[in-house]
Image (spheres, rainbow, N blue to C red):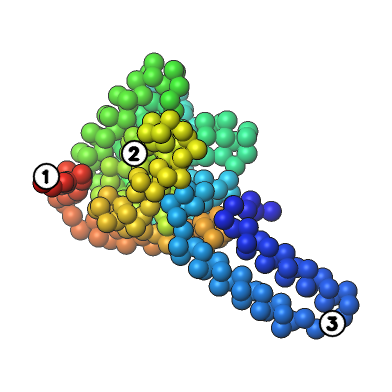
């Protein structure tokens, strides 16, 4: 059974009434189809209204839904002939970042992304989607490989941030991310990044210096998690909802500030309700972007990418 979020409980109550009416109809032989249809329409209308007016804190819950598609789910729906490439060539294969060669509608791509699990065992294997320095170095190796052979790059990002543990700091977490930012800016092939769930801090940005950056409708992209922000500003992580509002983390706000290039619509109820539909929407965005970016020369790609990020954070002084 799909996990029900707090704000979805009114829909669940209507659905329970529908099931109860169906049971009564079956057991008694009474014709309750009209009543059932009324409740079903009520549930559908409420669902559409609810999901078209979500608060940032509610989008946050959907972005973190335990059944939300992960990197390999998207690869399986979007790509053909995926071949995973392992390791950073310095002794480690960080499972929080997975990447490899694939085809999308016959077009070769290098697809790389953060990976989350759907069980405790899987999350331990993938470190809850939090990469270590070796993961960013693996991604960089694949970026350079793609650039050398003129293969477009697609990154799918869903991470609460880079791993903050002592082992990561000892192996230069900040340096690994900084090198990725610099080297991604220099890539001579099209780069498309999609934030599919959580996009937190430098852990996300280390894979998102791209020509086109997209955000799924209920994903979020931020310099710090709302809980982290609340802990700093109010010394109270329970005020994460207020922080989410203030941080402007949703696609609507990020489009307004020119942080992202587009929003990819999700099925009503979130990406976890229909893997096929959300994958098809993402695939279209990728292919449309490849058509556009493939017309640019390597020099133009780099210049436009540089200017795109250079203008972020512009402000006026009074």
Q: In the displayed image of the protein, which residue is found farthest to the left?
A: 318
Kindly indicate whether the residue at mark 2 contacts the one at mark 1 (C-beta within 8 angstroms).
Answer: no
Residue shown at 20%/38% (left/top)? 186
In the rendered image, the vertical position of residue 308 relative to residue 163, given as above or below: below
Q: In the displayed image of the protein, which residue is found farthest to the right?
A: 28
Residue placed most toward the observer, 119 or 88: 119
Q: In the displayed image of the protein, which residue is found farthest to the top?
A: 170
* Circle 3 Cα neighbour tier, 10 Å, few/some/many (<14 / 14–19 / ≥20): few
In the rendered image, the vertical position of residue 188 relative to residue 235, given as above or below: below
Residue placed most toward the observer, 140 or 271: 271
Residue 88, how many percent across, how many down? 39, 27
* Circle 1 Cα neighbour tier, 10 Å, few/some/many (<14 / 14–19 / ≥20): few
Query: Where residue 223 is drawn, which disc sits there?
Result: 2
Q: How many marks?
A: 3
Q: Tell me which corner region of the image, top left, top right, bottom left or bottom right, holds residue 134.
A: top left
Is residue 245 toward the left or the right of residue 118 in the image? Answer: left
Which residue carries the number 1 mark?
317
Marks 1 and 2, how far apart in space? 23 Å
Is residue 114 toward the left or the right of residue 46 in the image? Answer: left
Which residue carries the number 3 mark?
30
Residue shown at 23%/33% (left/top)? 182
Q: Tell me which corner region of the image, top left, top right, bottom left or bottom right, holds residue 16.
A: bottom right
Residue 240 in sight: yes
């Amino acid at each position: 059974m799909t996990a029900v979020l707090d704000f979805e409980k009114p829909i669940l109550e209507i659905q329970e009434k529908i099931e109860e009416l169906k049971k009564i109809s079956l057991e008694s032989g009474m014709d309750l189809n009209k009543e059932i249809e009324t409740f079903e329409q009520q549930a559908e209308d409420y669902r559409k209204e609810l999901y078209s007016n979500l608060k940032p804190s509610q989008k946050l819950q959907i972005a973190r839904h335990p059944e939300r598609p992960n990197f390999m789910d998207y690869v399986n729906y979007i790509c053909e002939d995926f071949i995973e490439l392992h390791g950073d060539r310095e002794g480690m294969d960080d499972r929080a970042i997975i990447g490899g060669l694939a085809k999308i509608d016959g077009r070769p791509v290098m697809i790389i992304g953060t990976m989350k699990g759907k069980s405790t065992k899987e999350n331990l294997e993938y470190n809850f989607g939090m990469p270590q320095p070796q993961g960013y170095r693996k991604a960089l190796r694949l970026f350079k490989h793609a650039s050398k052979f003129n293969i477009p790059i697609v990154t799918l990002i869903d991470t609460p941030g880079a791993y903050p543990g002592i082992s990561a700091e000892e192996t230069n977490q900040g340096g690994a991310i900084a090198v990725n930012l610099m080297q991604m800016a220099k890539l001579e092939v099209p780069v498309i990044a999609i934030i599919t769930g959580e996009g937190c801090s430098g852990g996300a940005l280390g894979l998102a210096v791209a020509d086109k950056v997209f955000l799924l409708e209920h994903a979020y992209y931020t310099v710090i998690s709302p809980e982290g922000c609340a802990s700093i500003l109010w010394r109270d992580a329970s005020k994460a909802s207020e922080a989410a509002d203030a941080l402007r983390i949703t696609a609507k706000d990020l489009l307004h500030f020119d942080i992202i290039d587009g929003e990819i619509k999700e099925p009503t109820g979130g990406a976890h309700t229909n893997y096929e539909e959300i994958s098809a929407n993402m695939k279209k965005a990728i292919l449309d972007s490849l058509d556009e970016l493939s017309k640019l020369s390597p020099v133009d790609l780099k210049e436009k990418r540089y200017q795109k990020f250079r203008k972020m954070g512009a402000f006026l002084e009074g």
